[in-house]
């Protein structure tokens, strides 16, 4: 779980994170503790998820040295306007109760991307953010950002699952040395009973979730499966002892319906 990919600034990022969208209260706190005690070293949160305080508390309480844990949060798009960006970041840091975040992302390419990126660059230079990146950016958004950015984004976190393979954005990022992260990597849990995936799972004696997560890994993608159940959290990380064949990778690539779960995309989002 704590194996890593290298980012374009030389830093490392653990290949698997616990996702926390929709995790709340004691459940969110406990899920983070369970993940950290099961070997996860990367937790993904966002201001929008309203659980930064719980994630931060788990990171502080877990008795694993802070520098071994990779914490990601995100600036909500409504804060990506002049005058709000600094306050948004400071609120995140305070909410987490941490001295720095390992990764901070612009959550959506909406509002003032250019100015918001400058703010991220400032905090990156001050060491309060160890790596900066973006989320839900398509190649056209990345190209726009490139024009004014001094520092290239280290990652792009986008929705990816077998029904939404995202070949265009993944190829663009990988050609430009931007690590891709998958949110909703299990298709929000809805693709676990797809016959193709169930058949592959039987063949490798793994669960459908493990097959999907291994598929992301072999594409070179960081995945952030969300679960609040310890046995699933452990299961999702147990994907390092087998390898999908080229043929099986291909079968899964061909499941692409170009279909987003549609959940959570702001109305202002330009595809
Ligand atoms: P839960 O949190 O109740 O365990 P995604 O990461 O694509 O957003 O998917 C998250 C959804 O998939 C959640 O509803 C989560 O439920 C469920 N889930 C996560 N891991 C597994 C697993 N190994 N087996 C079955 N369902 C899972």
Image (cartoon, rainbow, N blue to C red):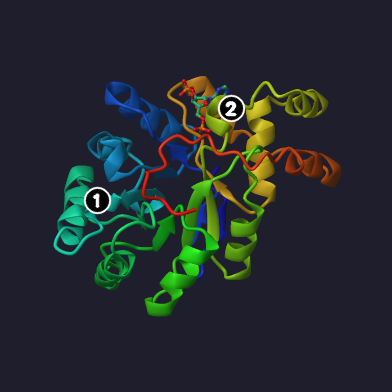
Q: Secondary structure at mark 1?
A: helix
Whether residue 260 is visible here, answered yes or no, is yes
Position above or below: 197 against 144: above
- Residue bearing mark 2: 235
Residue 191 bears which disc, if any?
Answer: none
User: Residue 192: x and y, percent?
Assistant: 64, 24
User: Residue 195: x and y, percent?
Assistant: 76, 23
- Residue bearing mark 1: 78
Position above or below: 194 against 180: above
10 Å crowding of disc 2: few (<14), some (14-19), many (20+): some
Q: Secondary structure at mark 2?
A: helix
Q: Of tags 1 and 2, which is closer to the observer?
A: 1
First in sequence, mark 1 or 2: give its number. 1
Q: From the Cβ of disc 1, is ligand 1 less than 8 Å away?
A: no
User: Residue 202: x and y, percent?
Assistant: 79, 23
10 Å crowding of disc 1: few (<14), some (14-19), many (20+): some
User: Residue 89: x and y, percent?
Assistant: 22, 55
Q: Marks 1 and 2: CB-CB under 8 Å? A: no
Quarter that holds the N terminus: top right
Horizontal placement of 84 versus 148: left or right? left
Q: From the Cβ of disc 2, is ligand 1 less than 8 Å away?
A: yes
Q: Image point 66% across, 54% down: which residue? A: 167
Q: Toward the viewer: 129 or 133?
A: 133
Horizontal placement of 217 versus 264: left or right? right
Q: Image point 48% across, 42% down: which residue? A: 17
């Amino acid at each position: 779980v704590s194996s890593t990919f290298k980012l374009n600034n030389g830093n490392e990022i653990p290949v698997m994170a616990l996702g926390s969208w929709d995790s709340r209260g004691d459940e969110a706190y406990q899920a983070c503790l369970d993940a950290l005690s099961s070997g996860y070293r990367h937790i993904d949160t966002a201001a929008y998820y309203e659980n930064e305080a719980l994630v931060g508390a788990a990171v502080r309480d877990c008795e694993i040295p802070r520098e071994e844990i990779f914490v990601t949060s995100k600036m909500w798009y409504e804060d990506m306007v002049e005058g709000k960006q600094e306050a948004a970041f400071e609120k995140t840091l305070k909410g987490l109760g941490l001295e720095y975040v390992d990764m901070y992302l612009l959550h959506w390419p909406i509002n003032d991307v250019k100015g918001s990126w400058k703010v991220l660059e400032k905090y990156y230079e001050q060491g309060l953010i160890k790596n900066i990146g973006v989320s839900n950016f398509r190649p056209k958004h990345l190209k726009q950002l490139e024009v004014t950015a001094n520092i290239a984004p280290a990652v792009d976190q986008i929705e990816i699952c077998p029904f939404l393979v995202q070949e265009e954005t993944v190829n663009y990022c990988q050609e430009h040395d931007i690590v891709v992260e998958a949110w909703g990597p299990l298709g929000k849990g809805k693709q676990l009973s797809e016959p193709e995936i169930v058949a592959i799972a039987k063949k490798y004696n793994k669960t459908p979730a493990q097959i999907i997560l291994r598929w992301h890994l072999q594409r070179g993608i960081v995945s952030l499966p969300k679960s609040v159940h310890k046995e699933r959290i452990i299961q999702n990380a147990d994907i390092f002892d087998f390898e999908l064949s080229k043929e099986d990778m291909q079968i899964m690539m061909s499941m692409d319906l170009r279909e987003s779960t549609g959940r959570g995309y702001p109305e202002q989002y330009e595809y």
